[in-house]
Image: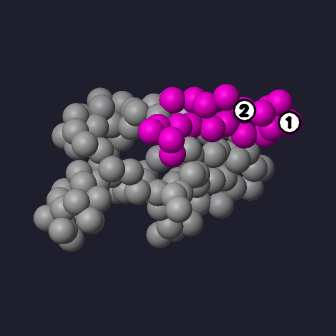
Amino acid sequence: MSLHHVALEVAPGDRDALVAFFALLGFEEAPLPPSLLGATRWMERDGLQIHLLFADDPVAPARGHVAIVESDYEQALDRLRAAGFAPEPREEHWGAERCFVAAPGGHRVEVMAAPPTAAA
């Protein structure tokens, strides 16, 4: 079993900024089936997708988040900072660096240097 995608609600006005944000983390826009054109945009990296669902009143949970493992953690943070984002370092739980970043539209994204199983 594997996780295929997560879905985040986003205001239509934030969609381009959120697509650009995930591109900083190595995601590329994925093609949509014709039935979904105009309702969503999909980002993909290594078979994992993030679906951006357009909503007039989107909900970005205060503590909920997407966690992304970056094999070159420092370069990823450099790209985020250069684009105006402010990664907030967090305590290491498994001996690997991690931080949270506020993405466009208010979603929290955790960036991790390694997944728990690899760093434990």
Classify mark 1: helix, strand or loop.
helix
- Residue at image position (33%, 50%) is 69
Figure disc tally: 2
- Residue at image position (38%, 51%) is 68
**Picture coordinates of residue 60 (x, y %)?**
59, 60
Closest to the observer, 77 or 1: 1
User: Which amino acid type is marked by label 1?
Assistant: Ser
Closest to the observer, 32 or 23: 32
Residue furthest front in the image: 1
Left or right of 100 in this view: 103: right
As measured in the structure, the alpha-carbon distance from the residue carrying label 2 to the one carrying label 1 is 8 Å
- Residue at image position (47%, 57%) is 66
**Picture coordinates of residue 19 (x, y %)?**
55, 34
**64 is higher (above) or lower (below) than 109:** below
User: Which amino acid type is marked by label 2?
Assistant: Leu
Classify mark 2: helix, strand or loop.
loop
| Quadrant of the frame with the C terminus | bottom left
- Residue at image position (83%, 30%) is 34
Res. 21 visible in picture:
no
**Picture coordinates of residue 77 (x, y %)?**
26, 40
Left or right of 5 in this view: 36: right
Color theme of the render: one colour
Left or right of 94 in this view: 12: right
In the image, the segment drawn in magenta is: 28-48
Mark 2 packing: few (<14 Cα in 10 Å), some, or many (20+)?
few
**Picture coordinates of residue 110 (x, y %)?**
37, 56
Q: Which residue is mark 2?
A: 32
Does the magenta segment cover residue 30?
Answer: yes
Q: Which residue is mark 1?
A: 35
